[in-house]
């Protein structure tokens, strides 16, 4: 199925709108699972529900004509980035309205722990990743792809066009750096 998804993404790159129609049923379940992982850490009563997050990401994906899709892993990495951006924008808007009160908390997946705390502030994590990207963009991308995108080490290496060992090293160093950065907050 991975090759079929990649083929449809490439056809979509070439302007085949029917390829998009055939692609979405193939990726819907994975997008929903990705959104569910994001939403699992959100507070009860969050204004966005899992399906709404998938739909919002889908609408932004359709409008992303500038993206030159490489493969399935790249598609899900971009989807994860869009979902992250949607949730961070919503969190910033609520935080601004409430002047810092009731900030969204995101539980970190046990397999991808960045900190020993049971939850981390999504806005603080986004700020830390932005800071990390300013001096080491690749490490920031590794965290984004692994933690937010749910990509494996191998898929992350494929998207970034680096070795598996480089991803593993970047992942380990970025987690330590983020832990220190988040502890400052």
Image (cartoon, rainbow, N blue to C red):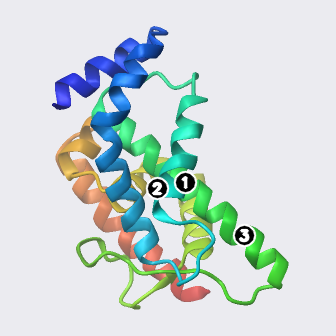
Q: Residue at the spot x=28%, y=45% of the render?
A: 156
SS state under label 3: helix
Find residue 140 and name its label: 2
Alpha carbons under labels 1 and 2: distance apart = 5 Å
Q: Residue at the spot x=58%, y=48% of the render?
A: 56
Disc 1, disc 2: CB below 8 Å?
yes
Alpha carbons under labels 1 and 3: distance apart = 19 Å
Note whether 72 is above or below 133 in the view shown.
above
Note whether 86 is above or below 57 in the view shown.
below
* Of the pair 101 and 155, the residue shown nearer to us: 101
Reading the image, the residue beneath label 3 is 92
SS state under label 1: helix
Find residue 133 and name its label: 1
Q: Earlier in the sequence, mark 1 or mark 3?
A: 3
Q: Earlier in the sequence, mark 1 or mark 2?
A: 1
Note whether 109 is above or below 72 in the view shown.
below
Q: Position of residue 132 (x, y in %)?
A: 54, 61
Find residue 49 and name its label: none
Q: Earlier in the sequence, mark 3 or mark 2?
A: 3
Alpha carbons under labels 3 and 2: distance apart = 20 Å
Q: Nearer the viewer, mark 1 or mark 3?
A: 3
Q: Position of residue 2 (x, y in %)?
A: 19, 31
User: In the image, 76: left or right of 154?
Assistant: right
Q: Nearer the viewer, mark 3 or mark 2?
A: 3
């Amino acid at each position: 199925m991975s090759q079929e998804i990649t083929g449809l993404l490439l056809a979509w790159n070439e302007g085949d709108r029917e390829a998009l129609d055939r692609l979405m049923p193939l990726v819907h379940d994975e997008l929903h699972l990705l959104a569910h992982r994001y939403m699992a850490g959100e507070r009860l009563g969050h204004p966005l529900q899992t399906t709404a997050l998938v739909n919002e990401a889908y609408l932004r994906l359709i409008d992303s004509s500038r993206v030159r899709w490489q493969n399935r892993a790249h598609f899900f990495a971009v989807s994860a980035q869009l979902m992250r951006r949607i949730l961070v924008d919503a969190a910033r808007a609520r935080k601004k309205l409430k002047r810092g009160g009731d900030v969204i908390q995101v539980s970190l997946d046990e397999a991808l722990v960045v900190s020993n705390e049971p939850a981390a502030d999504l806005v603080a994590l986004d700020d830390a990743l932005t800071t990390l990207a300013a001096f080491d963009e690749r490490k920031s991308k590794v965290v984004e792809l692994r933690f937010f995108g749910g990509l494996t080490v191998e898929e992350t290496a494929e998207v970034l066009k680096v070795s598996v060992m480089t991803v593993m090293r970047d992942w380990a160093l970025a987690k330590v750096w983020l832990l220190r950065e988040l502890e400052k907050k």
